[in-house]
Amino acid sequence: MTITRFAPSPNGPLHLGHAYSAIISHDLAKETGGRFLLRIEDIDGARSRPHLADEFRRDLKWLGLEWDEVPAQSTRLGSYEAAFSKLRDFGVLYQCECTRADILSAGAEIGPMGAIYPGKCKGKDISPDGKAQWRLDVDLASKITGQLKWHDAIEGAQFCDPWELGDVVIWRKDEPASYHLAATLDDAADGVSLVTRGRDLFAATHIHRLLQALLDLPMPRWHHHPLLLDDSGKKLAKTRGSPAIADLREAGEDGHLLAEQLRLQSFPSGISLQNA
Ligand code: GLU
């Protein structure tokens, strides 16, 4: 029995790319008689707009999906804190005071999800006064775990390569856990067996696999689906004119029909599937 999830952040309305992702995840679970979970990832501080969670539920219902909702991230802060302390006590985290500008001016290489931290604060003596963020020492952590592997349903077996993202932030100074720590812990706590999400998060999985090994969490499998692109070849975004699902719903369109079209990969004009 497969357990999948859809884990939107209420930072903006869902668009066709989210709907496509939710449908893939839903169908992968349901075709095995499994469960499709909805988890609201609402720990993004100022960007989080909690009222959107209700809109998301309406959108998914309108698309004809059925789900079990698990607790939102904002209710799980204690588990993030406990895992953070454990990692810190292992000695695999270090404090970092760098701003984004410091990182860019240090000539950081740009990786698949932004600048790769050049290690400026590694080995620096910073007093733990809560004003610094904490990063994962990927060299040290990988030495402890040894070579790890994971499996993607589309791309097959992968050697874990956490250097693709480098020493990511695990604990933020002004907000709780980073996405990497929170999502990894939640997927384990929710019993997710197939983590289904867009290909834009492929590189993040190397970090998640490393965290699982350090924290002794079970290893799921992954399915990173291709993204929907707009006519300029960029990932769909509300800001670039991709219609919000809520707008289509409120305009009286047929959500079940839209879901069927997305399943058949019949997209509105100007929208295409990555590498299709
Ligand atoms: N909350 C993330 C987002 O909305 C999804 C993370 C994931 O699927 O792992 O982009």
Image (cartoon, helix red, strand yellow):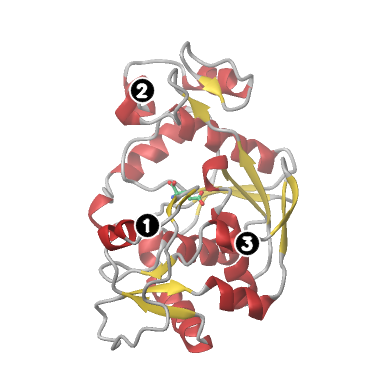
| Residue 192 image-quadrant placement | bottom right
Residue 71 at x, y = what percent? 44, 60
Task: Say which of 53 and 61 sits in front.
Answer: 53
| Residue 57 image-quadrant placement | top left
Residue under circle 1? 107
Q: CA distance from mark 3 to mark 2?
A: 33 Å
Query: Residue drawn at (49%, 57%), measured in percent from left and top?
Result: 70
Q: In the image as oriented, which residue stretches furthest toward the top?
A: 269
Mark 2 touches mark 1? (CB < 8 Å) = no
Could you tell me which quadrant the C terminus lies in? top right
Residue 20 at x, y = what percent? 53, 30
Dot 2 or dot 1: first in sequence order is: 1
Residue 129 at x, y = what percent? 25, 85
Position of 213 with respect to 20 (left or right) is: right
Going by the numbered disc 2, the residue's amino acid type is Pro
Tell me if I can see residue 65 in this picture: no
- Mark 1 vs mark 3: give the one in front: 1
Element carrying mark 2? loop
Residue under circle 3? 191
Dot 2, crowdedness within 10 Å: few (<14), some or many (≥20)? some
- Mark 3 vs mark 2: give the one in front: 2
Determine which of the numbered discs, if any, sits on residue 243 in the image: 2
Mark 1 sits near ligand 1, with its Cβ under 8 Å away: no
Going by the numbered disc 3, the residue's amino acid type is Gly
